[in-house]
Image (spheres, rainbow, N blue to C red):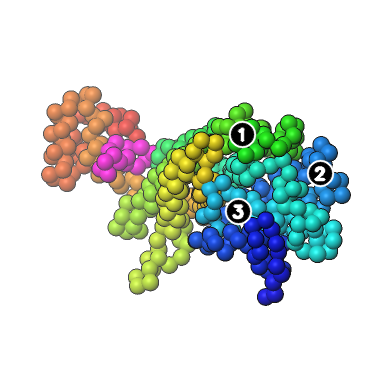
Amino acid sequence: MSFREEQDSMGTVNVPEDAYYGAQTKRAVDNFSISGLCLPLSFIRAVALIKKYAAQVNRDLGLLSPELAPAIMQAAQEVIDGTFDEQFVVDVFQTGSGTSTNMNVNEVIAGRANEIITGSIGGKSPVHPNDHVNCGQSSNDVIPSAIHIAAFISIRAELLPSLEKLCRSLQEKELEFSGIAKIGRTHLQDAVPVTLGQEFSGYARQVELAIERITGMEPRLAELALGGTAVGTGLNTHAEFARRVIALIAQETACPFIEAKNHFAAQAAQDSAVEASGVLKTDAVSLMKIANDIRWLASGPRCGIGEIMIPDLQPGSSIMPGKVNPVLPEVMMQVAAQVIGNDAAITIGGQGGNFELNTMLPLIAYNLLQSIGILAAAVNAFAEKCVDGIIANKEKCASTVDKSIALVTPLVPVIGYDTAAAIAKEARETGKTIREVALQNRILSEKELDRLLADSGSR
């Protein structure tokens, strides 16, 4: 690959000739490529969205030449469209303000804008990455704003629709299974009867609450730090800049973004991102419980609980022919574990706010956006390829109810705890059912027994 030398204020570095980015990006790649991980493209698109409307507003405010602004806006839109995805090469582990990524975007947009104007890729003239693309901005307000924008859009476009789909799927199963009695379980031991529909109603409500938690934190996530520049004072930006840019972003995305009520809080802390991650963690815990329950209820097919059957997706063993594993519940559980782990990193990242700036912004961005993305994909697949195809094993459900020792519980109000305990003890020792023991000992009439057991949901 041929190279050209590009001079900037920090010295001479070699930049690939086919690169739209410039010296600062190249230096970051050369010196700080730690993990091979880059920030998600959804984040890059959020930064480019800011740059697009920053150029428009700066032009309207008379701060950017009408000759340069259209080229910058076009280049930014091409970044949003994914035309230059391979040009965003900075490692996620970089300067804590995310300056390297901000400059990566500034340089790609400037490089492409210069190509639009002059026919030559890259460089700093006539469009300069700092003076023009970054006009009225700082990494310190752009990067926190991009975190909020990317997270909010991803939640609205991906995560909430997938959770709503899962909720509908579970509610449909709740209705479908409403008349199927089965044994309840507490402490992994037999408890009193429930219906399979009631069990699934609990899962559906958990997902409803997951959705409520997410929408409840949206107002805080909608506040953007843009306009605070370096430390929150708004140095070197027009008083109207942030409000106008954010209004245009809100209009394009159909998301209710507003300027932060306090720029010092918006840049010095990342409390809203930490809150969002905490909500995702809570929802992940709910989803792990649901997935694990479904995995256990489908265990078998002959020697497990086996009260439901889930779709077969693939052979489950490389050594045991015919074995099929609960793939999607296990996928959901692993994704939930990853989200919980990401939350730990984000929580520590949130503690990285010293004085006027949080300096763990790339870490927070990467983990938060990963959590949203993988949770959305897993929930969607879990609903579509697992829950929708669940079938009740009615015979197995009925058989467990009849055999349960816990079936003595609804008799207690009539015969008393001690007598009920004696019936349970005899049933356990003889292998007989509660019904059989109660009838043989003439403790209750068959009619009374039928009524009490029917009230329990067993028949």
Question: What residue is shown with label 2?
Answer: 64
The residue type indicated by label 2 comes to: Leu
Question: What residue is shown with label 3?
Answer: 100
Please tell me whether mark 2 sits on a helix, a strand or a loop. Answer: loop
Cβ–Cβ below 8 Å for labels 3 and 1? no
Highlighted range, magenta = 179-195
Query: Counting other residues with Cα less than 10 Å from the Cα at mark 1, is it few (<14), some (14-19), or many (20 or more)?
Result: many
Between 249 and 3, the one nearer to me in the picture: 3
Query: Where is residue 158 drawn, in percent x and y?
Result: 60, 47
Mark 1 or mark 3, which is nearer the start of the sequence?
3
Please tell me whether mark 3 sits on a helix, a strand or a loop. Answer: helix
Distance of label 2 from label 3 (alpha carbons): 23 Å
The residue type indicated by label 3 comes to: Ser
Residue drawn at (71%, 46%), measured in percent from left and top? 134
Between 10 and 243, the one nearer to me in the picture: 10
Query: Where is residue 37 drawn, in percent x and y?
Result: 53, 59
Question: What residue is shown with label 1?
Answer: 232
Q: Is residue 220 visible?
A: no
